[in-house]
Amino acid sequence: MAAIARFQFLQPYPISKPSVFFSKFLQSSPSFSNFSSVKPCRIHFRKFSVTSPLCSSSGSIPECPESSESIVGDLLDYLNESWTQFHATAEAKRQLIAAGFHLLKENEKWDLQPGGRYFFTRNMSSLVAFAIGKKYSIGNGFHVIAAHTDSPCLKLKPKSASTKSGYLMVNVQTYGGGLWHTWFDRDLSVAGRVILRADDGSFLHRLVKITRPLLRVPTLAIHLNRTVNQDGFKPNLETHLIPLLATKTENATADSTEKSNVSSSKDVHHQLLLKILSDELSCKIEDLVSVELNICDTQPSCLGGANNEFIFSGRLDNLASSFCGLRAIVDSCALPEDLSNENSIRMIALFDNEEVGSDSCQGAGAPTMFEAMRRITDCLSHQSAGETDFARAIRHSFLVSADMAHGVHPNFIDKHEEHHRPELQKGLVIKHNANQRYATSGITSFLFKEVARLHSLPTQDFVVRNDMGCGSTIGPILAAGVGIRTVDCGIAQLSMHSVREICGKEDVDIAYKHFKAFYQSFSSIDRKLNVD
């Protein structure tokens, strides 16, 4: 990886299988852990996606060509790799290491220096990365973009094996507020993580992804439900939303010929499913001691529309925001001079469990980000920073809560407030709510829009109708945690929480440019405004 970091790839490399080539190249490269002698450079990730050892996937994803000035092609690659929050975090980790960021461990001592770039993960589903300005001094602020890695989906129940009417079924639970009717009649599969028992008795954490269609939730034929078009499709989420795995056979119902000593997986999941997982991971069935899997749509993310102006994909909420923020922090400090005049700390925080309220060890409700801020302050002061130092740092800090926004739906225009109807391809949407469902204030909105104005980037505003309820984000949670100034924003999209969502291609590039400009110019903008 150290060798790769010296290259600047501007054109596609003339080989037919770049991922295989670079996998072999990396195996012969120096240790990934030593970046002290590497001169950072701008790295274009898309053409050279190298699968992390943590990830396992089969099959291939079709390429979608995109100009080098746009990050849309890279986003499509990221979406196609990131079927779960675990894969999204692993891919972010891979890209940060490739860009020269140093991996930290939360349970180890940190040695931080001005000009350094660092990150850590938690639960392999949340991540915090930061770059320290070379002119940073104790009490200066953190400039943060925060997003989330999870999306509404179906998850396997702890005991998933079920048999009905000659079918092998997989019992699932609903995660988040999904549009569950959109999951019917889709080509589905599984992805997530497992714990493996190693030959020496230790346990290994591995990611797995089965890319071929494996499951399906069939709808009931209209002949057996004649009034569905008049009465609406109203499935019972406990009894109707159960995917089919296979037809029942003697081999499928009998115990595996390879007897398992681990009852935790043998008895609760179909042996056929475990065999597919073990084949993918090149291990024995009895080595699978724990399984945590999501149900995922197998259709790849792609461009669509007559002019290829849309992105059709699952999990846009909120991996589109996550990737734009990730790419912005990488590109805003890729060269040594990028941090030479920075007196603050640039940070990105990607959290899990936003779709279910954020109250988890890896969610925004945990003090992960603020503990990291205090720890960074302590390390750079070479002692335990006092309450005054950390309090001053928070007062100088600014948080951008980035989550997808509701674009106006052409068939349901009346669902939007008349003067606040965000359109696709018109820039980031600033979200406002008087009841603090969003954390935006007049001051934070002005500052974030000033970044856009100085870089000639468009913005829009969103307010929900007074006669409708308003969703929320991690913005108010983080803002209330320690009183950090916060603005809520997002890319306008349609079909939010569907198995397949839509956003505008141009908005992705605008969001990336806005986030990058925020990192590069917010310090100078903030100094011009004084609010007691």
Image (cartoon, rainbow, N blue to C red):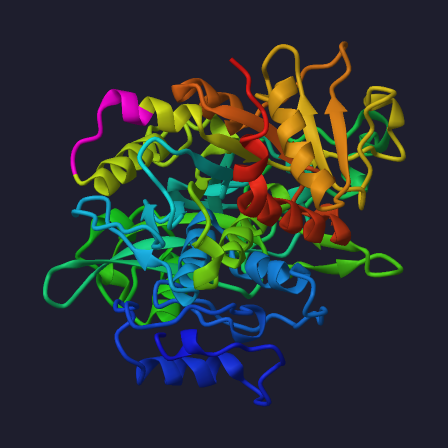
412 to the left or right of 180: right
Q: Nearer the viewer, residue 195 or 377?
A: 377
239 to the left or right of 56: right
How far across and down, in percent of the image, does residue 288 sit?
Answer: 27, 58
How far across and down, in percent of the image, does residue 257 sit?
Answer: 27, 68
210 to the left or right of 381: right
How far across and down, in percent of the image, does residue 5 sit?
Answer: 42, 73
Q: Is residue 489 above or below residue 468?
A: below
Residue 385 figure quarter: top left
278 to the left or right of 18: left
Q: Residue at x 71, y 72 (%)?
A: 65
Looking at this rendering, what residue extends furthest in the left direction? 200
Can residue 320 be seen in the rendering of this structure? no
Q: Is residue 257 above or below residue 20?
A: above
What is the quadrant of the N terminus in the image?
A: bottom left
Residue 283 figure quarter: bottom left
Q: Residue at x 22, y 24 (%)?
A: 386
Reply yes or no: does residue 205 show up in magenta. no
How far across and down, in percent of the image, does residue 527 sit?
Answer: 54, 31
Q: Residue at x 53, y 45 (%)?
A: 519
Reply yes or no: does residue 388 show up in magenta. yes
Residue 177 figure quarter: top right
Q: Nearer the viewer, residue 266 or 525?
A: 525
Q: Is residue 483 above or below residue 225?
A: above
Q: Residue at x 38, y 85 (%)?
A: 24
Residue interval drawn in magenta: 383-390
